[in-house]
Image (cartoon, coloured by chain):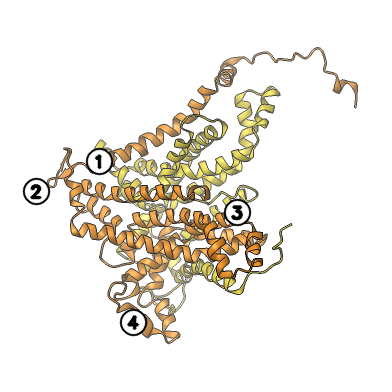
Chain colours: A orange, B yellow
């Protein structure tokens, strides 16, 4: 190493001269005033989200306090709680109850199916297998929603692959017996609540797997070993060690499955009975009925339910698992 | 060293996990079979025969092309807006601590956390209140809003991994703010932005729930498919379009995964 590299040359000034031009001035200004830079960076996204999104939400809320004139069909822009009163009619209460029940069942089923996949991916899959599992969950999550629904229309159709499969296994009587049940049955699987349920579980399942896997990744493997060393059966280990530690992840996943089921109107429209869900009611009210106030009031229901749900989830520490 | 290395899973767990993955993938694979069926009227299984003629029929359908072109244009513009807004927001949130920082990230995530129908009907009623007619831009407005979050998530994860001292070093070496951004910050976050952009594109390209409220009479490809699902006109054409959509969305996702695979595995999480 030469001496030149170690000893600074006296000719070089410690502070560079100020760079000229508008660009230099601007650069210096933003460096001296980080607050200004922050403001410039935050303003566009906040303005966009604030005006387009929050503004729209307020417009929605505002509309729900309007009412519709039953004779002319015009919207009466005066404050009233009448539209919210309409929500408590028996048919509308039915819709809300049906949707919430479906959302709860879908959430439960997703958790049961997701757990083994998430557990295997978190604890046993390594290297290539881990990547494969990751993609195996990611690809269905990101594939087209409508195509997934369409695929199930193919599967559940009366002449479709599932009927064929039951026939080949000589189990057609089982399918027929299930379809003849009062609430869950129907003409074929594609026009029954069972069909709606299966498709909901299928479409939202990846949203449950990811947070559960994230929660299980954080459980040290030796905790499970310690539990079995201390004499616990696999079932006891699951109940007392794994499940409590995975619970925040399950709750985090259930936020998605629950919220998405509450708001969906396409799946029950394509696969299901003619009885409405909240989303369909909203869609029908704003579209054919032209009753935007009632549609707006209907959307407030999932917002309120999700508000309580999120509040409960936060208390259980679910947000750390997201 | 992990004590459980080499230990294999119990058979029942393997079976349950395998069944779960099959449940996730078989329905999508079925689409590929149906695209080649000769059956026109029903969804009969097994298909009576196989043919590739429906690809030619679909190719010559102008309504499919129009819907596809609208979808691509909407997705491109929405992705561009989301890239700008998402990058700005993530840079602000990860570089400094300020009052209301949590609120900002909540605001970004909200459009995707609340059910799509709420975003949709909210925009619809805002358009109704302000007398904005439906147009190409009303669709973009909705799409860009929920696309910001995927760009934001990817960029925030990358910013978390890049150390702030690099920026200081760049400044110490005499670069001004713009040069630092161009030569230090941008190369560091470029792949994360590309991944976020890919996912935003896929998200917008596939979106149907919000779009039904903001499109009016216009047809994006998902709306075209929805129409076909409710009132089928030519089922084989729908089969072919479904298969093409699967392939088209597959590529950006695989590419986004490839770009972000080392380290921040964020690309797809939290759609």
Q: Secondary structure under badge 4?
A: helix
* Disc sitting over residue A77 in the figure: none
Nearest to N terminus: mark 2 or mark 4: 2
> Are discs 4 and 3 located on one and the same chain?
yes
Front residue of B195/A131: it is A131
| Displayed quadrant of residue B94 | top right
| Mark 2–mark 3 distance (CA, rounded to whole Å) | 61 Å
Task: Categorize mark 1 by other alpha carbons within 10 Å: few (<14), some (14-19), many (20+).
Answer: some
Q: Which residue is mark 4?
A: A177
Task: Categorize mark 4 by other alpha carbons within 10 Å: few (<14), some (14-19), many (20+).
Answer: few
> Are discs 4 and 1 located on one and the same chain?
no
Q: Which residue is mark 3?
A: A218
Nearest to N terminus: mark 4 or mark 3: 4
Horizontal and vertical percent for residue A128? 66, 61
Mark 2 vs 4: CB contact within 8 A = no
Q: Is residue A291 visible?
A: no
| Displayed quadrant of residue B160 | top right
Horizontal and vertical percent for residue B56? 44, 65
| Displayed quadrant of residue A174 | bottom left
Q: Which residue is mark 1?
A: B128
Q: Secondary structure under badge 1?
A: helix
């Amino acid at each position: 190493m030469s001496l030149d590299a170690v000893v600074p040359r006296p000719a070089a000034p410690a502070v560079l001269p100020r760079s000229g031009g508008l660009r230099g001035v601007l650069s210096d200004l933003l460096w001296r005033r980080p607050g200004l830079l922050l403001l410039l960076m935050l303003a566009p996204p906040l303005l966009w989200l604030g005006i387009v999104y929050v503004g729209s939400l307020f417009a929605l809320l505002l509309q729900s306090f309007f009412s519709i004139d039953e004779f002319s069909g015009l919207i009466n822009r005066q404050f009233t709680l009448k539209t919210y009163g309409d929500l408590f009619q028996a048919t509308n209460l039915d819709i809300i109850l049906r949707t919430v029940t479906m959302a709860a069942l879908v959430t439960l089923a997703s958790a049961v199916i997701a757990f083994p996949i998430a557990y295997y991916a978190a604890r046993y899959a390594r290297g290539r297998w881990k990547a494969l599992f990751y993609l195996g969950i990611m690809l269905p999550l990101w594939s087209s929603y409508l195509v997934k629904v369409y695929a199930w229309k193919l599967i559940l159709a009366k002449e479709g692959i599932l009927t064929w499969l039951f026939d080949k296994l000589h189990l057609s009587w089982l399918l027929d017996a299930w379809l003849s049940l009062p609430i869950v049955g129907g003409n074929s699987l594609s026009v029954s609540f069972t069909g709606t349920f299966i498709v909901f579980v299928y479409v939202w399942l990846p949203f449950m797997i990811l947070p559960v896997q994230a929660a299980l990744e954080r459980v040290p493997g030796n905790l499970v070993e310690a539990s079995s060393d201390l004499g616990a059966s696999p079932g006891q280990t699951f109940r007392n060690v794994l499940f409590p530690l995975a619970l925040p992840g399950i709750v985090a996943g259930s936020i998605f499955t629950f919220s998405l089921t509450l708001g969906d109107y396409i799946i029950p429209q394509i696969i299901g009975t003619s009885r409405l869900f909240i989303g369909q009611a909203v869609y029908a009210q704003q579209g054919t009925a032209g009753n935007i106030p009632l549609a707006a009031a209907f959307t407030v229901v999932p917002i309120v339910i999700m508000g309580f749900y999120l509040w409960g989830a936060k208390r259980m520490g679910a947000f750390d698992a997201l | 060293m992990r004590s459980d290395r080499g230990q294999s899973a119990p058979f029942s767990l393997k079976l349950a996990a395998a069944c779960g993955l099959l449940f996730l993938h078989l329905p999508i694979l079925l689409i590929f079979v149906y695209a080649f069926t000769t059956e026109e009227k029903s969804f009969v299984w097994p298909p009576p025969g196989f043919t590739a003629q429906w690809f030619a029929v679909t190719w010559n359908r102008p309504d499919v092309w129009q819907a596809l072109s609208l979808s691509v244009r909407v997705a491109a513009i929405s992705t561009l807006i989301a890239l700008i807004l998402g990058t700005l927001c993530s840079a602000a949130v990860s570089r400094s601590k300020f009052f209301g920082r949590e609120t900002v990230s909540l605001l970004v995530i909200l459009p995707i956390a609340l059910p799509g129908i709420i975003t949709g009907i909210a925009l619809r009623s805002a358009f109704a209140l302000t007398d904005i007619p439906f147009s190409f831009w009303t669709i973009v407005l909705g799409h860009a809003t929920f696309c910001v979050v995927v760009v934001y998530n990817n960029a925030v994860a990358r910013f978390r991994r890049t150390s702030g001292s690099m920026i200081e070093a760049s400044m110490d070496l005499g670069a001004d703010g713009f040069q630092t951004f161009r030569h230090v910050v941008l190369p560091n976050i470029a792949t994360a932005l590309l991944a976020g952009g890919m996912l935003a594109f896929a998200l917008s390209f596939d979106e149907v729930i919000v779009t039904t409220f903001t499109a009016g009479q216009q047809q994006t490809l998902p709306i075209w498919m929805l129409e076909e699902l409710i009132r089928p006109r030519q089922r084989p054409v729908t089969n072919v379009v479904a298969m093409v959509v699967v392939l088209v969305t597959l590529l950006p996702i695989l590419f986004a995964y490839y770009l972000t695979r080392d380290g921040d595995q964020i690309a797809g999480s939290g759609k």
